[in-house]
Amino acid sequence: MNHSQPPHQFTAKAVRDFADASAPAGTGELSEIARTVASQYRADTMSPVMVSGLLRLCEFLILALTGLSIYFAYASGAVGPTYGYPLVILAGSGLGVLLLEIANLYQLGVMRRPFVFLPRIVLVVTATFALLAMAGFFLKISDEFSRVWFAGWLASALLLVLSGRVMLSLLIRRWARNGTMERRALIVGGGKPAEALIRTIEQDPDNDIRICGIFDDRDDSRSPPIVAGYPKLGSVTELVEFARIARIDMLIVSLPLSAQSRVLSLLKRLWVLPVDIRLSAHSSQLRFRPRAYSYVGSVPMLDIFDKPINDWDSVAKRLFDISFSLAGLIVFSPLMIATAIAIKLDSKGPVFFKQKRHGFNNEVIEVFKFRSMYTDQCDPLARRAVTKGDPRVTRVGRIIRKTSIDELPQFFNALLGSLSLVGPRPHAIKGHSQDRLFEEVVDGYFARHRVKPGVTGWAQINGLRGEIDHDDKIRRRTEFDLDYIENWSLGLDLKILFLTPLRLLNTENAY
């Protein structure tokens, strides 16, 4: 077997290209029970990865602020001002966090049970200070530092780090009880394999997975309605609708690896969701190299799809949106005020126009724009695309649409969080091409909603803007959107953002 390209590594293109004539085109209606269960999981959760990252930051600050506090309280008066102390404090704080990381002391199981790992934590923190003392000895600078300060820093750091760990463990237990910190999973596939998988997951005391239900296409005669105490909530088609309502983090496919055709058929319907998709290798006879697996508790999983722009990436992107949205509103405020005045003088009606569009995970959002049509002829559902010389467009509207000034109010959307500055452009709910809805034209169209839509996007700077009067136009836009999602980085966002004004100079398809 070629381990460099194991058969479980399906690409997004392979899933899109896989033909499955029997796969339903739409989403199924959820049962009342499934809808009730989904409504219980509408609230967002806190990721263990985020908690672990925040703990690293907090412990760095604990070490640094403790060292500085003791220096200012004692050593600064004894030795006078020196730059050596802050440098040593920062170096020691960074080294301490690094050694705790190397010792695997930021894992969820460690954070939950600090008393079990107390000796290792004490050893690592003490080793950090021992290394600092050794460095001072070999560099012949130890005489320049107060021994009382050093001993006080060590004792205080140990006390505060251990106290912080105990407090965090209490918080984690509370978050686990009320559902604030957990990874929510759905099992795809039922029967004995799903039961064995669930039992194994539940046996792990450090597991952060909450199983929310089971979905299976097979009827009750082949797949029991209750598996290991969990209800079968519907078919795989209905799972998509369930995941639109509930905040689900992971889909675990409990199917044999040998059933590649069936797996691909499932992925064709599931990959449009913004979730991690894992294929359970719990009962598989095939064995890959250890690094080919990820683990849910002790259960080996094969990673099929990862949720895009997750955890700290999402934090970085949100900070990016807030910073540049505020900058954009400040820079363009004179132009926006002038546009608002021109719209008011040109025709009767409101300055702004709100349109319902598809947002993240297919949620319906309201997007702000400057009004460019006569009030009585506005088309909030975009049933009729704007064409060249369209009589519904006002005189000012022609100018602001051609220059994309009408989109500037979407800085407010990005600031409030319903849009991102960069992402797939949000389309109207009833957007269509040649009398067919976009989702009917493009297979996997909704996969572009796995991330927040954007004010500008990869498709737009590649010349795909304006009227969609042919099926190929929406297909090409979707291809660029999916390419953006699969290759996202902050660098790519910056590139798109700074290229957008240059691309707007081409107004050929904007009217």
Image (tube, grey):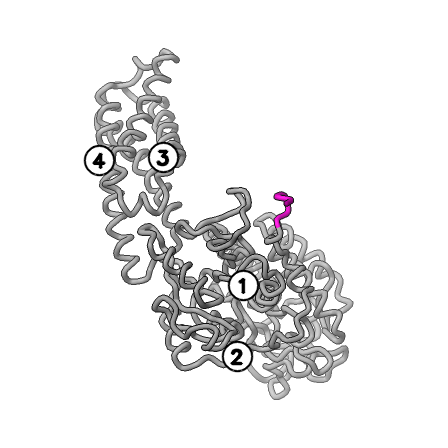
Q: CA distance from mark 1 to mark 3?
A: 35 Å
Left or right placement of residue 158 versus residue 202 in this view: left
**What's the magenta region?**
1-6
Query: Label 2 crowding class (10 Å Cα cut-off): few <14, some 14-19, many 20+?
Result: some
In the rendered image, the quadrant that contains the N terminus is top right
Determine whether the residue tagged by mark 4 lies in a helix, strand or loop: helix
Q: Is residue 67 above or below residue 338?
A: above
Residue at the disc numbered 2: 28
Q: Residue at x 74, y 73 (%)?
A: 471
The C terminus - image quarter: bottom right
In the rendered structure, are the residues bearing label 1 and label 2 in contact, judged by CB atoms less than 8 Å apart?
no
Question: Which amino acid type is shown beneath numbered disc 3?
Answer: Leu
Q: Which residue is mark 3?
A: 100
Q: Earlier in the sequence, mark 1 or mark 3?
A: 3
Pointer 1 residue: 452
Residue 294 in the figure: left or right of residue 382 = left
Q: Residues under labels 3 and 2: Cα distance?
A: 48 Å
Q: Which mark is residue 159?
A: 4
